[in-house]
Amino acid sequence: MVNLKALAISTFFFVSSLAASSNDWRSRSIYQLVTDRFALTDGSGPACSTGDRVYCGGTYQGIIHHLDYIQNMGFDAIWISPVVSSFEGPSAYGEAYHGYWPQDLYSLNTHFGTGQDLKALADALHKRNMYLMVDVVVNHLVSKASPPTFSSFNPLNEASDFHTKCLITDYNNQTEVEQCWLGDDNLPLVDVNTENDEIVKTYYDWIKTLVGNYSVDGIRIDTVKHVRKDFWPGFASSSGVYTIGEVLHNETSYVADYTNVLDAVLDYPTWFPLVAGFQTQFGNLSDLSRVITASQGAYKNGLFGTGSFLENHDQPRFPSLSNDTARLKNAISFPFIHDGIPIVYYGQEQGYTGGPDPANREALWFSGYAQDKDLVQHIKTMNAARKAAIAANSRFLSVPMTFPLASETTLAVSKPPMLALFTNAGVSGTASWNLAKSGFNGNTRLIDVLSCTVVTTNSDGSLVANTTDGLPQIYLPVSALPSSSNICTGKLGTGNSASGITTSSLMVVGLATFAWLLMEIGL
Ligand code: ABC
Ligand code: CA
């Protein structure tokens, strides 16, 4: 007779040891950090001047000690810097503190800790039901000498393992993008000959071992457009986990092709109009809806599983482009109502303002990891609201976002049970959203999770909302709020008598009429 209990137990262990798939990642929320700049093992906070481009001391143990900080904001995955070893000492562009200049595939970057430390990080994350995403680089190896010393590389240590040197100059020539070199004459990124079958096999074996050794749950792949497309499916399947690729390009049609060879891409095509749309009051938010609608149709899985972000380590931080706190809150909220997986770049929550690389890689210890900051709370609320939306309607993760309203200055995004209203009007700007169809039934009570204001849809399901402070409004039905959540704790039940702006303005009109009447009758 089959021992059902044993079968159940073995099935459980089998299932729980399975690698994380694209589907497992969909509901997640990712905190991206630069390992060297996040936290030190001993908790100290040494000087760290971004312009010096040197190691500042961050480690895997440092991350472990601050997992509460990350998890308290509602993240359930982290993305760390590349882990393999690079050259030591300065190059023309400083030290390899960011990890993107691999030299020896088979040893780890010891600045960040040992293999045991990395394994401990994976274990600590898994205990919290959090995932580990590791950044990986295939396209190049880097030697600090120019011309490069091939013998310093492992395992590809001969000139013939690489493409013949030519620097990429024409980004419209795809062969050049794939087979010429990134970087410049001061520090060329030596381009791996990924057309060679043996080298391909080396990389497939390498990724399988890396993922297995350190219980990695997902990989972020660097420079994807610089390697021929048909290299990637085999690499992705060897990894056995969720793969998300960096294809730095603004065109949906160009990026879409890569969704056929990897699980997902970082959603750069949306990022461009996201930044441009909210950077000034003259941005055009309808560009955002146009690009998203096109990407939903062009990407293999629509935008589901793509990485949605406002900042990363390659781009100037948003507050360096715009100092308007209302526009910042709009832009920072957007990835949370996107179809994809929200990714927050460390330091966003602390309001960091660094400009282009290397200024955007500030040490987080200078913030004291303060949890009472306005943006920390904002991000925490957005994570909680997205989780509440998923819990209330599992189709949140499979029904594409739509745009009941898209103009230059206002945008409404519907993703039941969430409705988000955005504007680039800024702190002193006014805006109104007049939605004939809010996506909700008539007379539904909605709460803006950011202000905790309750409004009620009109009997025909329409909704009119206004703002005089330029802040976004993120609505969930009051009935969708979980009883235990940190959304509007203690605030619900105080302001819910008013059925929104329309009612309160009616009340103002009513009072004024009453006062006028009193005056007329001589009281
Ligand atoms: C170093 C120094 C910098 C210095 C620079 C010249 O050299 O640190 O201070 O300014 C790593 C390091 C960097 C380092 C580089 C080069 O290596 O992190 O600090 O810069 O040594 C990935 C990673 C990135 C990493 C690498 C290399 C690749 O995310 O952190 O950098 O492993 C290209 C690649 C892209 C790459 C990016 C940095 O460079 O495609 O994978 N990112 C155009 C091209 C893009 C190109 C981009 C920037 O320029 O199309 O392919 O990205 O050069 C839009 C267009 C886009 C256009 C943008 C700029 O404008 O639509 O196509 O992108 O309108
Ligand atoms: Ca290449």
Image (cartoon, rainbow, N blue to C red):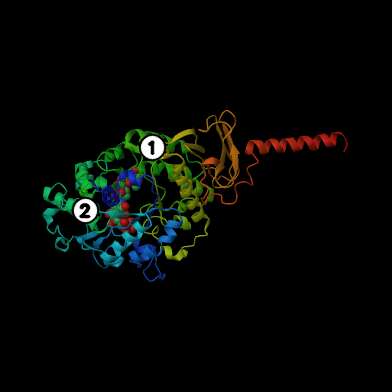
- Residue at (30%, 38%) from the top-left corner? 256
Of badges 1 and 2, nearer the viewer stands 1
- Residue 63 image point, x, y percent: 37, 63
Residue 503: quarter of image:
top right
Tag 1 and tag 2, C-beta contact below 8 Å: no
Indicate if the residue with disc 1 has its beta carbon within 8 Å of ligand 1.
no
In the shown orientation, is residue 93 left or right of residue 198?
A: right
Amino acid found under the numbered disc labelled 1: Ser
**In the rendered view, would you say 485 is above or below 460?**
below
State whether residue 156 appears in this view.
yes
Residue 362: quarter of image:
bottom left
- Residue 113 image point, x, y percent: 29, 67
Element type at marker 1?
Answer: loop
- The front one of 30 and 465 is 30
| First in residue order: circle 1 vs circle 2 | 2
**In the rendered view, would you say 41 is above or below 127?**
below
- The residues bearing labels 1 and 2 have C-alpha atoms spaced at a distance of 30 Å
- Residue at (50%, 48%) from the top-left corner? 329
The residue where tag 2 is placed is 207
In the shown orientation, is residue 145 left or right of residue 285?
A: left
The residue where tag 1 is placed is 398
Element type at marker 2?
Answer: helix
In the shown orientation, is residue 157 left or right of residue 24?
A: left
State whether residue 59 appears in this view.
no
In the shown orientation, is residue 159 left or right of residue 225?
A: left
- Residue 106 image point, x, y percent: 19, 61
- Residue 22 image point, x, y percent: 31, 44
The numbered dot on residue 446 is none
